[in-house]
Amino acid sequence: MMVESPMGSAPVRAGESAGQPGLRKVITTAQLWSIAVGMVISGEYFGWNYGWAVAGTIGFLVATLLVTVMYLAFIFSYTELTTSIPDAGGPFTYANRAFGSTAAFIAGFATLVDFLMAPPAIAAALGAYANFLNPELPVLGVAVATYVVFITINILGIKESANFSMIVTALAVVELVVFMLLVMPAFEVKNVVAHNESFGAGGVFAALPFAIWFYLAIEGVAMVAEEVKKPNKTIPRGYLLSIGTLVVLALGTMLLTAGAGDWRLLSEIDYPLPETLAMVLGRTSPWSKIFASLGLFGLIASFHCNTIGYSRQIFALARSGYLPGFLAQVNRRFQTPHWALIAGGLVGFLALFSGTTGEIIILSALGAVIMYISSMVSLFQLRKKEPDLQRPFVAPLYPYVPAIALILSVVCLIAIIYYNIGLSLLFAALLAVSLLLFRMIGVRGAGSSVIR
């Protein structure tokens, strides 16, 4: 929500006063690429391999190709929304503008689940990698310490956080390239196609949430849109560079890992890549330990960048009155939403101690696909409702590309619900209770982005 400032000056966001600092516009194209790739890149390190357990390598490859097409279509369409409405609320803001407050609440809830569930899964994997290196390090202890450290880093400022994300993301990308080069000599097609006797459509659909994990959270760029320099140019460049990077890394990592040996040994562990190197090079090879050590960079990059994402979504919802107003407070010194960071961390703790990695990934994917559907429906509605809205980037081949993203998102949603009834009912119950409370209380009006 925007209001005009006195004397015809630039608009001031509701809840902020003129001359009072809000979120800083400091993020460049390179930093945005690093945040987008960083949000996702842990998906190449772990989690996706659970798809092999339900679909085998062939079924999971089909699922991954379907999801890759969905994400390419989605990003080309979503970029139109992000550049037209550069707001930290992202999908929540688009739905609010297209359909009103109830639709906005549902989109915001789904986005919160998406971004709040990803960090605990990543933190658990960080603990597993650390335990692989040193069995004396407890998995949960490392996971909890990760939350404390990176919430603190994010409180210290977005520019500092973006610079940090550039370093760890670049290291994570380089490491995946090194991994692929090391594994490539051992690659054999017969390993990829082996043990796929149960291949079928059911396995493909059951594997979809784990294929989504390859790309899940790239949409989080929308959450930092208010902090981007020259968003009209920077956001499209950042999105297109990041989705290109991730497609290459996802397909390369999956296929080379599948062809390196008996993939069944990797289908239910949180550290498939160092285990693959141990299979290929031998368990005494220093590369296995070195890779596990460096592999922490990929997990750190994603944890760090998803922390940015969930905090901005909580901040935006609170600023608009959908969550308690104190969550929209911005730290006076560092200009970061410190209470939003801390509150999201507490929710992550609960998830970390109450669910398995696979279950957390499925919940995150469920929130994500509902958010994708909401965003694509909002795109169609805004084209009708606001034809004159300034659109610095226009979805190519409209309406076909957004329709592809929408249809495939609906397919993914149906598949996730069908194969995960219990988790889907949990999600629906939480949404219903939250929506009931929202209906009873109503929007309080724009929350205050108070500087503290």
Image (cartoon, rainbow, N blue to C red):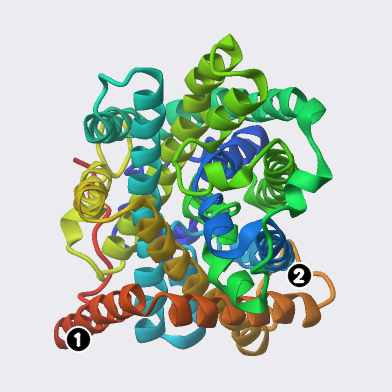
In this view of the protein, which residue sits in the foreground, 60 or 366? 60
Residue 369 lies, with reference to residue 312, above or below; the image says: below
Residue 425 lies, with reference to residue 350, above or below; the image says: below
Q: Secondary structure at mark 1?
A: helix
| Label of residue 106 in the image | none
C-alpha span from label 1 to label 2: 35 Å
* Residue 419: percent from left, percent from top: 46, 77
Q: Which quadrant of the structure image shows residue 446?
A: bottom left
In this view of the protein, which residue sits in the foreground, 284 or 451? 284
Q: Residue at x 54, y 37 (%)?
A: 272
Q: Number of labelled discs?
A: 2
Q: Secondary structure at mark 2?
A: loop
- Relative side of 172 to 396, left or right: left
Q: Residue at x 56, y 20 (%)?
A: 291
Q: Are marks 1 and 2 in contact (CB under 8 Å)?
A: no
Q: Quadrant of the C terminus?
A: top left
Q: Earlier in the sequence, mark 1 or mark 2?
A: 2
Q: From this viewpoint, is residue 230 visible?
A: yes
Q: Residue at x 56, y 58 (%)?
A: 51
In this view of the protein, which residue sits in the foreground, 264 or 116? 264
Label 2 crowd (10 A; few <14 / some 14-19 / many >=20):
many
Identify which amino acid the numbered label 1 is placed on: Leu
- Relative side of 79 to 360, left or right: right
> Between tags 1 and 2, which lies in front?
1
* Residue 393: percent from left, percent from top: 74, 62
Q: Which residue is mark 2?
A: 395
Label 1 crowd (10 A; few <14 / some 14-19 / many >=20):
few
Q: Residue at x 77, y 29 (%)?
A: 186
Q: Which residue is mark 1?
A: 436
* Residue 279: percent from left, percent from top: 61, 28
